[in-house]
């Protein structure tokens, strides 16, 4: 499989490494090589089976429009753009392409979201107060994180759960869901030790998407990987 990786940040570089380890041909474009998606011409994009985007909230939409407009298959791990998800999904469908999106491509995080969803209603009924805290590296541009927003959506049965965002050092990602009553406290947490889990999930998602068309959320398909 030929994979085009957009973004040469820490996660983007690791995605390229993991894809190569799994036997795929890899080409990486960094921001300087692809200003305003200028490099993403139809002939260039057609040379790849799947595009994986780990860029920035400022660049991702331009990249998505350029790739999806020519019917490409795109895995997007960048967050901070979900207000335009419907538009990008519609473009993918109209152009007979494919889009796999996710706020977090870690299998562990997906299991956490399922656990949080199962906990929400009984805890709320029992009078627990819920809150979410997320901590990431200081260079992360969006706050709250996409994962924290997904976690908040997972516990929507408990009402509007507040999110606290912290930016410290080079933390890959720490998410906590805390439920407190007068009698006790429950804490559900996921701590990423590094970015490899995100990269592996994205590459495995790309392998899965290569034979499909349409729009998919990683949380709905991760068990198939």
Image (cartoon, rainbow, N blue to C red):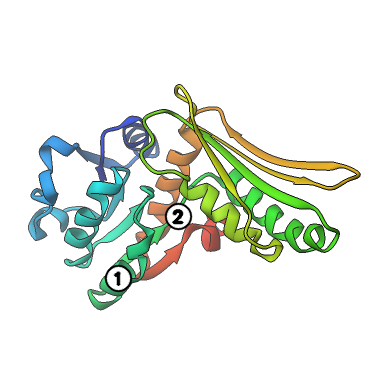
Image x and y of residue 122, in percent: 81, 61
Few, some or many residues within 10 Å of mark 1 (<14, 14–19, 20+): few
In the image, taking residue 209 as reference, residue 87 lies left or right, namely left
Which residue position holds label 2?
102
Few, some or many residues within 10 Å of mark 2 (<14, 14–19, 20+): many
Image x and y of residue 28, in percent: 22, 38
- Callout 1: SS: helix
In the image, taking residue 80 as reference, residue 126 lies left or right, namely right
User: In the rendered image of this protein, does residue 159 appear above or below residue 2?
Assistant: below
User: In the rendered image of this protein, does residue 172 appear above or below residue 128?
Assistant: above
Which residue: 88% across, 46% down? Answer: 182
Give the number of the disc on residue 87: 1
Give the number of the disc on residue 64: none
Between 11 and 61, the one lying in front of the other is: 61
* Location of residue 213 (image quadrant): bottom left
* Location of residue 21 (image quadrant): top left
The answer to whether residue 3 is seen in the rendering is no
Query: Mark 1 vs mark 2: which is more N-terminal?
Result: 1
Image x and y of residue 185, in percent: 82, 41
Which residue: 86% across, 59% down? Answer: 126
The residue at the far bottom in this view is 94
Between 152 and 71, the one lying in front of the other is: 152
Marks 1 and 2, how far apart at CA: 16 Å
């Amino acid at each position: 499989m030929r994979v085009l990786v957009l973004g040469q940040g820490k996660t983007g570089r690791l995605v390229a490494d993991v894809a190569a380890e799994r036997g795929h041909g890899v080409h990486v474009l960094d921001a300087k090589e692809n200003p305003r998606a200028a490099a993403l011409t139809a002939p260039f994009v057609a040379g790849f089976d799947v595009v994986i985007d780990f860029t920035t909230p400022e660049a991702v939409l331009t990249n998505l429009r350029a790739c999806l407009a020519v019917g490409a298959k795109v895995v997007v791990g960048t967050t901070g753009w979900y207000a335009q998800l419907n538009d990008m999904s519609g473009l993918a469908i109209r152009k007979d392409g494919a889009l796999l999106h996710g706020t977090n491509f870690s299998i562990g995080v997906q299991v956490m979201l399922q656990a949080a969803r199962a906990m929400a209603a009984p805890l709320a009924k029992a009078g627990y107060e819920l809150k979410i805290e997320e901590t990431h590296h200081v260079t992360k541009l969006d706050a709250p994180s996409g994962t924290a927003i997904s976690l908040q959506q997972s516990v929507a049965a408990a009402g509007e759960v507040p999110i606290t965002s912290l930016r410290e050092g080079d933390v890959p990602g720490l998410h906590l869901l805390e439920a407190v009553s007068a009698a006790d406290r429950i804490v559900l947490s996921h701590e990423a030790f590094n970015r490899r889990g995100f990269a592996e999930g994205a590459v495995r998602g790309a392998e899965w998407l290569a034979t499909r068309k349409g729009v998919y959320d990683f949380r709905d398909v991760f068990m198939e990987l």
